[in-house]
Amino acid sequence: MIRFLWVMLSVFVLTACQQAAVDESEIPPKKITELRVGTLYGPQIFMTSGQGNSGFDYDMAVLFAEYLDVPLKIQPFTNRAELFDALRRNEIDIIAAGITDTPARREQFRLGPPLYHVNQILVYREGKPIPKDISQLKGKITVMAESSFVETLTQLQKRYPSLAWEQVTDKDSDELLAMIANKEIDYTIVDSSSLQINRRYMPELRSGLVLEERQNVVWLLPANDSDGLMSQLLAFWHQERLVGTLEHLNEKYFGHVKRFDYIDTRAFLRAIETVLPRYRPLFETHAGTDLDWRKLAATSYQESHWNPNARSPTGVRGMMMLTEPTAKEIGITNRLDPEQSIRGGAAYLRDMIKRLPESVPETERMWFALASYNIGYAHLEDARKLAQSMELNPNAWRDLKKVLPLLQKRKYYQKTRYGYARGSEAVHYVDSIRRYYDTLVWVDNQSKMPDEAPSELQDEAAVILPPLPLSPSQPK
């Protein structure tokens, strides 16, 4: 009898333990109260501008936080090593930074589902011999440390023992591409998306050998204790894939760069003759007495080619390419209405001009305001402070245009208050508008002297200015 009771007690205890184990395994994962996302600066990943944040990974992170119904905390890092360490130390929940799927990363982290695909491309500058084989390059390869490109080169070295390269920790892909364009280095390796975007601003870049094809870009999660978050991420990814979000974001950030082309001066002169007469009265009316209507018109051409139905890949619309929040702020209800768009653009520029310190001279205020219109007033102030620290004149455009591109370099932007900004785009943007403005002034003056401006001069004017690149916000 005692033996029977002992056996029954043992069975009861064992069953209870098994049931407890089952119950524990069925306990749902702890719900996070904030989605902490680590990222890197970059036009296709995460960037800030005068009209808000943008980037493929940023947009997806916003949607994922909404799916989880928690606040989103975006934390940009200045290099990949710090980013990876933050995930290992559980300081962030996810890395969303245009990171590709590689064997080494699979050993260290959990990889989310694919977001889009990229190729690894060897890049060189126009004028160099076309590279036929990785083992016969006439120069040195420079790549980012902690990047997938190092893994690729390491594998290639097994076949080509003499293959060598330099790793840098203080440069990102954009900076290395700029060094290629400036003839500072011979070759680098970047993802195809990065090359497509940067080629709009550095047309000297050339695509060489494709070293890896269709690599998945993924998010990274911690190797341990991330089952619940991974499960939610997979469900979210499946939902967004079905509704077409991934395809939409691919087109928004990458589709348009393949269609990029130059605008030549002859096309601008034709637009002045055929398109501008319809809208010139609106530019003159809303420029008023405090703005030069030709500067307002030049800005609009840079933004939209004077197309009232223009729409950029990032969702800004109309002749002045206003975002929806900006339009609401200045009382514009229909961004596609030419009158409202021009009125809104003029109001927004006036606001930018008024915010500038009085130390900026009247003759330069428009250029400063246009830079602010492009990248945001906060980044403009960062550039002015940086110029002052370099003993340059923060109130002179000639000095500020030297400093703005430094906001893309980690060495400088990590010391600023508002961080990374594509300052070189702002410089191109303002300088292009200035060239358009000069042409408008010339044409306007010629129209006032019809007998002294024979038609042949229009053909000669087409060679005065070089072809002009499209604005980053320009519809294609």
Image (tube, helix red, strand yellow):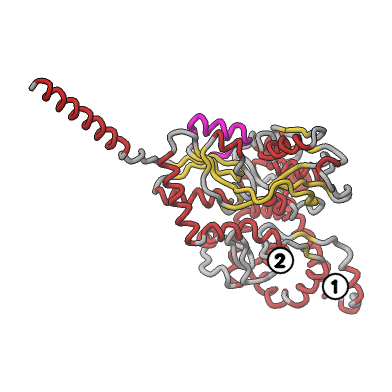
Badge 2, how many Cα within 10 Å: few under 14, some, many 20+?
many
The x and y percentages for residue 287 are: 66, 66
Q: Residue furthest bottom?
A: 451
Residue bounds of the magenta highlight: 75-92
Amino acid type at circle 2 is: Tyr
Look at mark 2 in the image and give the residue it sits on: 301
The x and y percentages for residue 260 are: 73, 61
Look at mark 1 in the image and give the residue it sits on: 446
Q: CA distance from mark 1 to mark 2?
A: 20 Å
- The quarter of the picture where residue 33 lies is top left
- The quarter of the picture where residue 429 lies is bottom right
Q: Is residue 376 visible?
A: no
Amino acid type at circle 1 is: Gln
- The quarter of the picture where residue 254 lies is bottom right
Is residue 87 magenta-colored?
Answer: yes
Is residue 226 magenta-colored?
Answer: no
Q: Secondary structure at mark 2?
A: helix
Residue positioned 61% across, 35% down in the render = 104
Q: Nearer the viewer, residue 307 or 222?
A: 222
334, above or below 9, in the image: below
Residue positioned 89% across, 50% down in the render = 127
In the rendered view, does 152 fall on the left or right side of 329? right
